[in-house]
Image: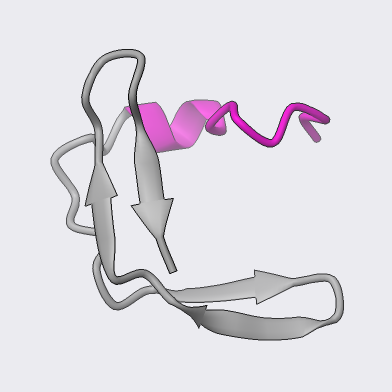
Amino acid sequence: MNDNIWAYHLAVALFEDRDLTGYKVEALDGAIGKVDKHSYETDASWIVV
């Protein structure tokens, strides 16, 4: 497990063309929402929940 929350798991890098919109986001204490927008731009990857 990676302790850096800003780093993607290696398996994610293999699917950079995958659309994450609509994926459910879970935290340790339960669901926090769904992905509304995302970006795979170099040095600027992000998601909006």
Residue drawn at (26%, 15%), measured in percent from left and top? 42
Left/right placement of residue 21 relative to residue 32 reads left
Left or right for 6, reference 41 = right
Work out which quarter of the rendered image holds the C terminus and state it: bottom left
In the rendered view, would you say 31 is above or below 28? below
Figure quadrant of residue 15: top left
What secondary structure prevails in the magenta region?
Answer: loop
**Image location (x, y in percent) of residue 2:** 77, 29
Asked if residue 45 is positioned above or below residue 42 in the image, the reply reads: below
User: How far across and down, in percent of the image, does residue 46 sit?
Assistant: 38, 41
Residue 27, given in percent of the width and then of the height, sits at 74, 70
How many callouts does the rendering have?
0
Q: Would you say 29 lies left or right of 38 here?
A: right
Nearest to the observer: residue 3 or residue 44: 44
Dividing the picture into quadrants, the one containing residue 9 is: top right
Colouring mode (rainbow / by chain / secondary structure / one colour): one colour
Q: Position of residue 19 (x, y in %)?
A: 18, 57
Picture residue at 60% right of the left edge, 30% below the top: 6
Q: Residue furthest top?
A: 43
**Looking at the image, which residue is at 65% across and 74% down?**
26
Relative depth, front residue between 22 and 15: 22
Q: Residue furthest left?
A: 17
Q: Quadrant of the N terminus?
A: top right
In the image, the segment drawn in magenta is 1-13
Q: Residue at x 59, y 26 (%)?
A: 7
